[in-house]
Amino acid sequence: METTKTNTTVITSEELRAHWQGHRGLTRKLIEAFPEQEFFDYSIGGMRPFADMVQELLAIAVPGLREIVYGKTEELHEHLEHGKQKAVILKLWDEATVQIDELWTKISLERFHEDILAFGQYEGSVWSTIFYFIDNEIHHRGQAYVYLRSLGIEPPFFWER
Amino acid sequence: METTKTNTTVITSEELRAHWQGHRGLTRKLIEAFPEQEFFDYSIGGMRPFADMVQELLAIAVPGLREIVYGKTEELHEHLEHGKQKAVILKLWDEATVQIDELWTKISLERFHEDILAFGQYEGSVWSTIFYFIDNEIHHRGQAYVYLRSLGIEPPFFWER
């Protein structure tokens, strides 16, 4: 174990970025674990296929951060041109990974407690908005675990980031 | 909207406590939304019924925080005497809510970056361990959303805390 660090904050900005990217890495593994067709079509109980949830996550992450950084209201674009190909989604996912890291460096520490209106309609602070992005991803990915299990596919471990 | 607050930290300890308790309030609503029998027995794809996941959450939250506060290794007790009654689980849930608030006041800010071994086996910092508790709850609750939907029951909104 490492020696104890001295730090009088709950979590640093860099730790939160890495925490989110760790979750995003796991979500990427879930996308990979789905068979191509089931990724786009399979659902339970009238819920959305995982591909639709992933498009929501893509619609939120980079545009949401861009709005936080530049202050210009963004729109939610949840319908991408994917041609039912996982490779297209995975490419967009990886591009978002790079963009998140770039945008993150532009959020100064003082801004996390600033009040904002995400996507022109969701009230919160910068921190609560970013936590919502992460929590929403965990929530939908948890649903994808059930989809995979019901398809007889062993999902990646939750704690593997 | 409130005026912008001055605060040079990502999230305060009190905000993290309230954030978790907000999630716990939503999880409580999910427990309430399940029919009694399905809460204990219903599953998809060989996964655990939601009652078993909730017992895991109860086994983690208070003992996990107690271990952080007092430094004495805790064991995971995931099998409670519930007699297949949701009321017993809900009572334990509400008792845990109070205990979490009490234990939380004993975690000083300097401790969040201390390295610990949760339940004698999981390496991490205090912050990453607490984030794991919260993320794990969101993950399993997301699965319970699928259970409810597949039972034809409308779950509470994810953003209602």
Image: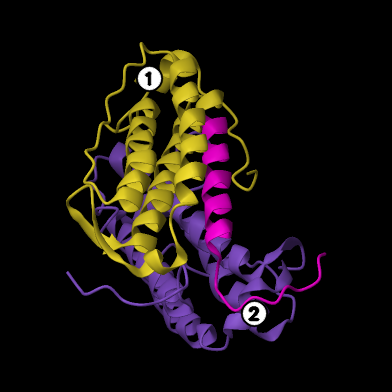
Chain colours: A purple, B yellow
The residue range painted magenta reads B1-30
The chain containing the residue under callout 1 comes to B
> Where on the picture, by quarter, is residue B152?
top right
Q: Is residue B48 left or right of residue A92?
A: left
| In the displayed structure image, the side of residue B121 where residue A82 appears, left or right | right
Residue named by callout 1: B40
The nearer-to-camera label among 1 and 2 is 2
For mark 2, does the 10 Å Cα neighbourhood hold few (<14), some (14 to 19), or many (20 or more) residues?
A: many
Q: Chain of mark 2?
A: A
State the residue in front, A28 or B70: B70
Determine if the magenta segment contains residue B16: yes
Q: Secondary structure at mark 1?
A: helix
Inspect the image, locate mark 1, and give the three-letter code of the amino acid beneath it. Phe
Q: Is residue A161 visible?
A: no
Coordinates of residue B60 in the picture (x, y in percent): 33, 41
Q: Residue at x 54, y 85 (%)?
A: A103
